[in-house]
Amino acid sequence: MLIQPSVIRDEYISYVRLEKNYSSNTVAEYEKDVDAFLVFLEVEGITDLNEVTYPEARLYVTGLYDRGFSRASISRKISSVRSFFKYAHSRHAINDMAFRSLHHPKKKERLPAFFYEEELGLLFSACEGEDKKSLRDFALLELLYATGMRVSELTAIRIQDIDDHLGILLVMGKGRKERYIPFGSFAQTALDNYREKSRPLLMKQKEHDWLFVNLRGDVLTDRGVRHILNRMMERASLHSKIYPHMIRHSFATHLLAGGADMRSVQELLGHSHLSSTQIYTHITKEHLRKTYMNTHPRA
């Protein structure tokens, strides 16, 4: 009996959301990638997933290149559709060889962008102030840099996740994996000021336990954090583009440059694999090389 691809798609999205327990952002990416592939099948007149063979898979990927997607995006889309077919094979005996034998495009080795300590100093200076907005923004930046957490992790923090006595906080990472991250006295002071002088004013008589809130007293979103950081960049007169992960990259780079061991940084970042953390060793080596070339008299 022919099972409609859309039916298997709905089953699969429920599977990654409920059984695999992926984050809402990850589920949304899978959903977008699988839906795009099903649109491709419609255009090609394919109504049975068993009809998808290697040539169809190659045609789909070629179309992605023609539309200007990056190698990293294409690699992710292949992984999403491959995972979808793997599920369809295990639950409905759908042939999954088409994408199983498809190779990922080679990624360009691109070093993550990060801030030098002087640039971070300018960012911190840009949001100093005693008004409720400045106190919140300063605490937000301090916590991002002190912990290296992802923005999605930052916006999910609740008041009770912070242990002020031990100087640690509980973070819910990718795949709903929990980890504890320490933070220092600078972040502690900024958090204290925010919670005592700013958050009560921002809450506007609302009651919830999310740590960071917007000007209406609602939970601060990932988009809100990006807006705050962009405003800091403008005030600091820094002309490079900023994205929240740059703070995370700076955290890891500065730790390794200061002598931290790789395993500790991996644990702090919440990386499942050490290879994800090793990219930062390339940054620190490149930084050393540039410093040498710029300062040694006979370089």
Image (cartoon, grey):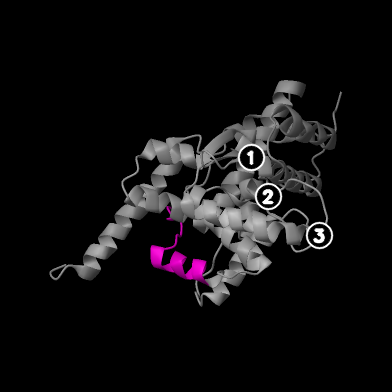
Mark number, residue 161: 1
* Amino acid bearing label 3: Lys
Disc 1 secondary structure class: helix
Q: Amino acid at mark 1?
A: Asp
Task: Give the quadrant of the C terminus.
Answer: bottom left
Marks 2 and 3: which is nearer the front?
3
Of 239 and 40, which appears nearest the observer? 239
What secondary structure is marked by label 3?
loop
State the residue position of label 2. Answer: 211
Residue 206 visible here: yes
Q: x, y percentage for residue 63?
A: 65, 53
Magenta stretch, residue numbers: 109-125
- Figure check: 186 above or below 292: above
State the CA–CA distance, disc 2 to disc 3. Answer: 14 Å
Question: Which residue is tagged 3?
Answer: 204
Q: Earlier in the sequence, mark 2 or mark 3?
A: 3
The image's mark for residue 36 is: none
- Front position in the image: 19 or 269: 269
Which corner quadrant holds the N terminus? top right
**Direction from residue 108 to residue 136 in the image, left or right:** right
Marks 3 and 1, how far apart at CA: 22 Å
Nearer the observer: mark 3 or 1; the answer is 3
Q: In which quarter of the view is residue 203 placed?
A: bottom right
Image marks 2 and 1: residues in contact by CB distance under 8 Å: yes
Element under disc 2: loop
Q: Quadrant of residue 295?
A: bottom left
Frontmost residue, 40 versus 81: 81
Tell me: residue 138, above or below residue 48: below
